[in-house]
Amino acid sequence: NAGVMQNPRHLVRRRGQEARLRCSPMKGHSHVYWYRQLPEEGLKFMVYLQKENIIDESGMPKERFSAEFPKEGPSILRIQQVVRGDSAAYFCASSRGPTDTQYFGPGTRLTVL
Amino acid sequence: AQTVTQSQPEMSVQEAETVTLSCTYDTSESDYYLFWYKQPPSRQMILVIRQEAYKQQNATENRFSVNFQKAAKSFSLKISDSQLGDAAMYFCAYRAHNAGNMLTFGGGTRLMVKP
C-alpha cells in the first residue's frame, strides 16, 4: 500500500520561472492538503482540496500560487514567477475523509536561485 | 484563531531514559484532535500519536504516550526508553473537528539522543 507520493523531491528554479509540484494521495484517499515549511519553522497550511474542488485556500498567498486536484491524476501546486522567498519544503498530505488522520508525503524541496 | 506553542526549541535525553516534550494550544472549540508528528533528518513527517479531545484516556503507542490536560490546554509527549532513532524534530499539531480540516502546527522541538 503505497503512501503519499510527491515529485519531484528536489526542484531548482531561477527567479521568474514557474514551479509545479505534484502529489498523488494514498489509495482510497480523496482529500489532499498542501503545507509549506520554511527553514527552522513548523508547517503552515496552504490549501485543502477534494477531487475537482478547492475547499479551503485560506493559507494560500493571494498571488502567484494556485492548486488543483483534477478528476484524474495528481494534485498540482503551481507557483508562478518564483522569488527567493518561495524557497521552502512543500508537503502534501492526504486523508480518506475530512476528519480522518492526514498522512504526509516526503515533501518537495524548492530552491529558488 | 488556533495557536500551538512548543516552548522547548531543543531537548536532549540519554539513551534508554525518558523525556517529555511540552505543547500548549489555544482554542475556543470543544471538539478537536491533537497530534504529535516526528520529522527525522529525511524530513518525512511521521505520525507518532493522536488524541481525540472527547476522550479522557491518554493515548499510548508503544514507548510513546501523552499527557492530555484539556482544561489546561496542554498536550505533552513522553518518550520512554529513548532510542538513537528517536532523534528528530517533533511537532505538535491541532485540528478542529468541524471548523475546517487544516492542521495547525507548533514550531517544533529538536530532540537529541545521547548514546
Image (cartoon, coloured by chain):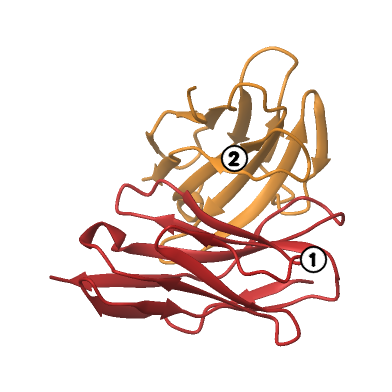
Secondary structure at badge 1 equals loop
With respect to residue A49, does B1 lie above or below? below
The amino acid at mark 1 is Tyr
The chain ID associated with circle 2 is: A
**Label 2 sits on what residue type?**
Ala
Chain seen in red? B
Residue drawn at (60%, 27%) of the image: A25
Left or right of A54 in this view: A66:
left
* Residue B99 drawn at (x, y percent): 86, 57
* Quadrant holding the C terminus of chain A: top left
Characterize the local packing of mark 2: few (<14), some (14-19) or many (20 or more) Cα atoms within 10 angstroms: many
- What chain does badge 1 belong to? B
Q: CA distance from mark 2 to mark 1?
A: 24 Å
Q: Which mark is residue B77?
A: none
Q: How many marks?
A: 2
Query: In the depicted view, which residue is nearer to us: B108 or A34?
Result: B108
Q: Residue at x 81, y 35 (%)?
A: A54
| Residue that mark 2 sits on | A93
What residue appears at the point 33 percent right and 54 percent down from the top-left corner?
B40
Evaluate if marks 2 and 1 touch, with contact meaning CB atoms under 8 Å apart: no
Residue bearing the label numbered 1: B54
Q: Which chain is orange?
A: A
> In the rendering, at what x and y percent does residue B114 appear?
17, 73
At 33% from the left edge and 71% from the top edge, which residue is drawn? B111
